Amino acid sequence: MSGQTALTVAIVAVVALLLGLRWIVRRVGCNCHLCGERMVFFRDLKEEEQGEILSYFQEYEHRLPKTNAILVCRGCRIVYDDFSGEARSMEGDDITYCKVCKSPWVSYLGGHIRSGDTRDITGFREKNSSLIDSIECLRCTREPIDALSCAACDTKVRVLGCRMCHTLHAWTSVRKNGLKFLVPLTDKAVASGPGEFLLRDM
């Protein structure tokens, strides 16, 4: 076997291995970051459930998400959409993209509090001053260990914050069906999709 043929065979083998691993991960799925339950792909939901999810996005976010990027947790009733990145990474975590500026630096405020950089929390408080009384996270004294400790917190509203534009997001149920979507707590329009990170309205 020539050197070029051996290289081609090696490349094909690596690509096949990667595709095989991706297929296995997709078959196994990933778990919800809140309850640890296995999540369901949008394509595996009943048609009625799919319709409820899509109607939320049309009515409240004025957009149609990429359905191949939607995962649903039946335990928490959380809908991870195309901003969450869960379908891409196949890892259930608390990191998501900002629905306003598309920044990839959105997580629970515990990580910001623990970092010791008070500029982060000051920025969140200044940008969301009207929410300080209603959202405990903005005046947190619980000393969270990290962002994940916020996921288990018993505060009424647990928020995730965008480090870039300081927009707060919260898992919110907006209809009687109990499905929870990541809703930005702002009057700014939701971006059409995660796509490219935008430096706008900072």
Image: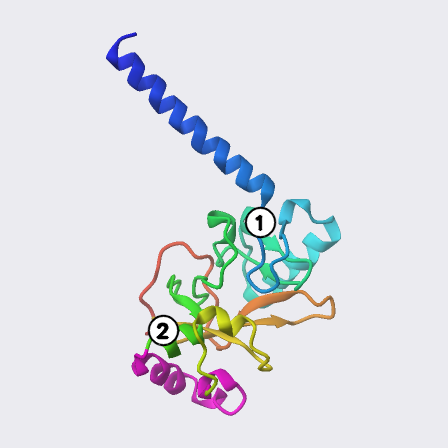
Label disc, if present, on residue 103 of the rendered structure: none
Q: Is residue 40 magenta?
A: no
Q: Which mark is residue 67?
A: 1
Q: What sort of colour scheme is used for the picture?
A: rainbow
Main secondary structure found in the magenta portion: helix
Quarter occupied by the C terminus: bottom left
Looking at numbered disc 2 in the image, what kind of residue is underneath it? Cys
Bounds of the magenta segment: 116-140
Query: In this image, 78 relative to 164: left or right?
Result: right
Does 176 appear above or below 92? Answer: below
Residue flagged by tag 1: what amino acid is it? Answer: Thr
The first of marks 1 and 2 along the sequence is 1
- Image coords of residue 97 (percent x, y): 43, 62
x then y, percent, for residue 80: 56, 58
Residue at horizontal 70%, vertical 68%?
Answer: 178
Left or right: where does residue 131 sit relative to residue 4? right
- Work out whether residue 148 or residue 118 is closer to the camera in this orientation and state it: 148
Give the quarter of the image for residue 117: bottom left
Residue drawn at the location 49% of the way across and 58% of the way down:
84
- In-image side of 109 versus 63 (left or right): left
Packing grade of label 2 (10 A; few <14, some 14-19, many >=20) is many
Q: Quadrant of residue 56?
A: bottom right
Examine the rendering and report whether any part of residue 83 can be seen: yes
**At 73% across and 49% down in the image, what residue appears?**
47
Q: Position of residue 183 (x, y in %)?
A: 54, 70
Q: Secondary structure at mark 2?
A: loop
| Left or right: where 96 falls relative to 202 | right
Q: Which residue is mark 2?
A: 165
Residue placed most toward the observer, 160 or 146: 146
- Coordinates of residue 161 in the picture (x, y in percent): 43, 73
